[in-house]
Amino acid sequence: FHSKQEALKWARLIEVQLEQGTYIDESPKNPIKSDISFANAAEKYLETHAIHKANYRSESGILRILSKRWNDRKLLSIAKQDVAHLKNDLYKLGRASSTINHYLNAISQLFKLANNEWGHIIPNPVEGISRALEPVGRMKRLLPSDEELLLYYCKQSCCKHLAQIVSVATETGMRCGEILSMRWEDVDFINRR
């Protein structure tokens, strides 16, 4: 810089960009491949990393939705404001807190992989954004007398197999759809599964 004033002006500008998550270090030593789009990074992540995860279907759905939202934007251009707007939009759509957190986690995992394994130096836009507060889960235990009463009324119901369905549900914790779609080949009597 030619003067201290120029240097201070530049420093203030960089500090603002860092706070907003829009700073791009274009110095030659920075290995950023700034041409990768969010959509391409998401596809690469899904093909190489997410495919091995148990939540692949939900994570791939989330990343494909985000790829459409951030169509041709560069991975580097996704800032905290974009994630904050996404979070607000999901709230407005009535999405559950856990769903919003799944979105934030998917974005964060993508950026971590880009930094740790792909050689990028990109600020993670999810860092510093608070997760949605999830409600405390319900925990209801039936007393033996309550279970007897429940089964008594199930037997009085017009639904012929309701008592058996409720018995299986209370013993296994299975959901209604799982019980109703169950077939004999799904039951393993030897291993009690």
Image (cartoon, helix red, strand yellow):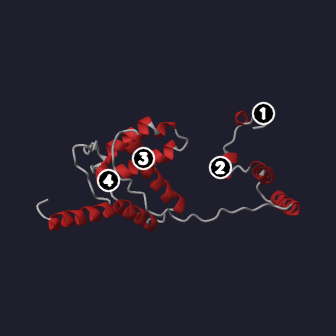
Drawn side of residue 74 relative to residue 176, left or right:
left
Q: Which quadrant does the C terminus fall into?
A: top right
Q: Which residue is label 4 attached to?
A: 70
Give residue 154's position: percent from left, percent from top.
81, 58
Nearer-the-camera pick, 143 or 5: 5
Q: Earlier in the sequence, mark 1 or mark 3?
A: 3
Gap in angstroms between the C-alphas marked 3 and 2:
37 Å
Q: Earlier in the sequence, mark 3 or mark 2?
A: 3
Mark 2, other Cα within 10 Å: few <14 / some 14–19 / many ≥20: few
User: What numbered label is drawn on residue 177?
Assistant: 2
Q: Are marks 4 and 3 in contact (CB under 8 Å)?
A: no
Q: Which residue is label 3 attached to?
A: 112
Dot 1 amino acid type: Asn
Q: Earlier in the sequence, mark 1 or mark 4?
A: 4
Q: Earlier in the sequence, mark 2 or mark 4?
A: 4
Dot 4 amino acid type: Trp
Q: Quadrant of residue 189?
A: top right
Marks 3, 2: nearer the viewer:
3
Nearer-the-camera pick, 127 or 9: 9
Q: Quadrant of residue 1?
A: bottom left
